[in-house]
Image (cartoon, grey):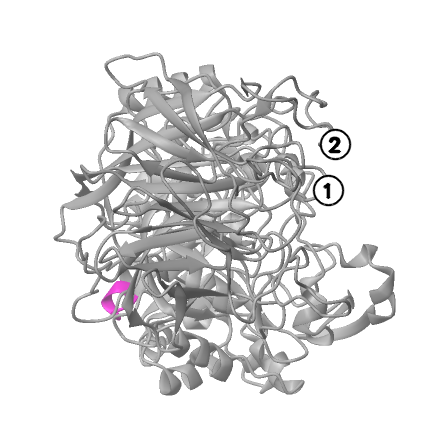
Amino acid sequence: MRRSVVPPLALALALALALALGAGTATSAAASSPVAASVAAVRAPAPADVGTDVGTDAGPGARTPGHGPGRDRRTAVVPTLVARATLPADFLADGPPSGALATPANGRQGPFAGQVVPGFSGVVDAGDGTFWALPDNGFGTKANSADFLLRLYRVTADWQTAAGGSGELRVGEHLALRDPDGHVGFPITHEGTPERLLTGADFDVESVVRAPDGSFWIGEEFGPFLLHVDATGRLLAPPVPLPGATSPQNPYLAPGEQPTVRPSAGFEALGGLRDGRYLYPVLENAYTADPDQRRRVVHEFDTRRNAYTGRTWDYRADRDGDLVGDAFWVGRHEMLLVERDNWDGAAAVVKRVYRVDLRRTDREGFLEKELVLDALAIANPHGIGAGDGYGTGDPFALPVQSFETVVRLADGRLLIGNDNNYPGNAARVPGTPDDTELAVVELRRERVTPGDVDVIAHRGASGYRPEHTLAAYALAIRQCADWIEPDVVSTKDGVLVARHENEISGTTDVATRPELADRRTTKTVDGQEVTGWFTEDLTLAELRTLRARERIPALRPGNVAFDGLYEVPTLAEVLDLARHSVTCDGAPVGVYPETKHPSYFDSVGLSLEEPLVAALRAAGLDDRRAPVVIQSFETGNLRELDRLTRVPLAQLVNCTGAPWDLVAAGDPRTYADLVTRPGLRDVARYADAVGLCKDVVIPREADATLGSPTRVVRDAHRAGLEVHAWTFRAENQFLPAELRSGADPAAHGDLPAEIRTFVDAGVDAVFADHPDVAVATVG
């Protein structure tokens, strides 16, 4: 584990700035707590440099939380905001009124007295300090965008930087996209006019590339088509369709014909031109009939032949709902791809730039993805844009719904930007339409300092988001956790998913679904009678209809704001998120899955061990050096896993009781027996670590204060086992009496003091619901 050392004064100053601006990614609960200063210590995860290969080889031997890979590495890439400029959301360009049929939102209703500029879906560096910027079709549909004229605008930025600057985007001349030569083979809005200006009812333009001759290639979504216009915006040839791809808005869709592409899911991304010849349009979403709804297809188009070559590549999104928002060609074989979700503001999860190399695929045939930039975690040491709303502190975030622009500038820095879907998006300030933003990010390589204690994000950043959601895991990574911890259970059709328990009425909205009311039942799990809805009674498709909710809303009311947003993730999705991420120290993000109730699942014919190992193998993580540790409260399945996989294992030890598999077998041994000297030596025969309930390490006295450390840490280390302690939570209800801040069980107390006490006792890693606090404490 490697982190920069941040002096306490710097923490306090950064926190004061963040609180004054109301910015950053901290929740209100964190900001109001005594340990909120930890938020200021959060560093942006360190991705790869653009155009360079950064190795993440774990080196020889197993990786467990106390022994992270590459501890001798001293640098990491830190994306840093260096310039920003905005165009006011309500800006109107010259031209006739627009938006007469636009959906009203955020206090704005058309018609507007000019041409709206609803953000930019594509940007081209003009090479002279200006940019050509392409808005999309206007207001989202064919039906409401006939009064929106398709244009390329020349924009100039007076960048706000550390040295000053107004931060204004200025709109200059425009190129009107038009078809005076009649190349479009279907009726258009301005059919009978000489210029035949193109509108948002004709095409949904989304991406743009400039050819060496100054002409532009444009990807659009109604076909999806490729358009080729000259340097003045004049269409040069008929729109080129993608064979076999038709959207519901395709003008050639025959009556009764089923579209193969979803609405607004065409060429949001267009990369090229490689060798000045080839384009690489990317479908924003999956084909409708694709059994793998995470697949996004990259096509190759030959501009000399004006035809597709038939070559394709498969890109896999981190989740079904993620979209490919833009593409930029960076070498003979490499592209940058924007991957985004549809959430914005604090709810945003994925706003990322990945690099792919068309020569490199994974074990399943998908392009290997390497993280270049997480747009939700950009260092902002100079406070650029501060005060402009959510996410404008340090770290800076671009938490917009439609992150749709990435350009690598000539100096290697990245330009990113948004489509603001005017007047609909309000990510920065609720109730106020988002401005159009362009930001310049420099990928700085900075020195980092190694630490000795790892932070394991318990069920993700579960103190800030509903547990076991990709939102919780992604936030934990942004908060600099070294590991994320999914609990693993099975669906009826044998798919492993992340839930704390197989009974899910407390962590999903299943109880509100009348179609699943008959699934409510009572079962005996590990000797306990449990009533509710169970994952093993639902198929993955049925489980996907549910949405996560906060498990302990009385203690974490801030998390309730995210109820109903996020799906239950599969283990495969969690593994992919981790392996496509890096820690703040530049190391691979570790995954620490727990098998829940393995004996019970064996009894119902849904063994966890084999599909878990298969999932690790598919992700390329079934290796002794892989950043994976499997944990269990039972002993038998760990012994089985010791034979099935090479990844490290951890024996969980509860405060009281006994492993259920031993109880079921009539074995009298308890958890207390496992942590005796002989017990630990036996555990060391099949495991690499013990995950200890905190009370096993430092018991609590009768008055609920911390007692004296036991000898278990020393004994475990002598047996060759690491010690990982669980679970550290900031709320008073979970803290020792002397560290509570008052009588309110939901208020935050002195969690850093508790963590320091256990670190002083010798633990190698801590499980924490508030990873940012833990990182700031042990870093």
In the foreground, 375 or 600: 375
Q: Quadrant of the C terminus?
A: top left
Magenta-drawn stretch contains 75 = no
Residue in the foreground of this view, choosing between 495 and 652:
495
- For disc 1, the marked residue is 143
| Residue 712 shows up from this direction | no
Contact between marks 2 and 1 (CB within 8 A): the answer is yes
514 horizontally vs 467: left or right: right
Question: Which residues lie in the magenta part?
Answer: 717-721
Who comes first in sequence, dot 2 or dot 1?
A: 2
Would you say 653 lies left or right of 531 here?
Answer: left
Closer to us: 330 or 697: 330
At label 2, which amino acid type do we have? Answer: Leu
Tell me: residue 576, above or below residue 337.
below
The location of residue 449, given as percent across then percent down, is 17, 41
- Give the quadrant of residue 512: bottom right
The prevailing secondary structure element of the residues shown in magenta is loop
Total of numbered circles in the picture? Answer: 2
Label 2 vs label 1: CA separation? 8 Å
Residue under label 2: 101
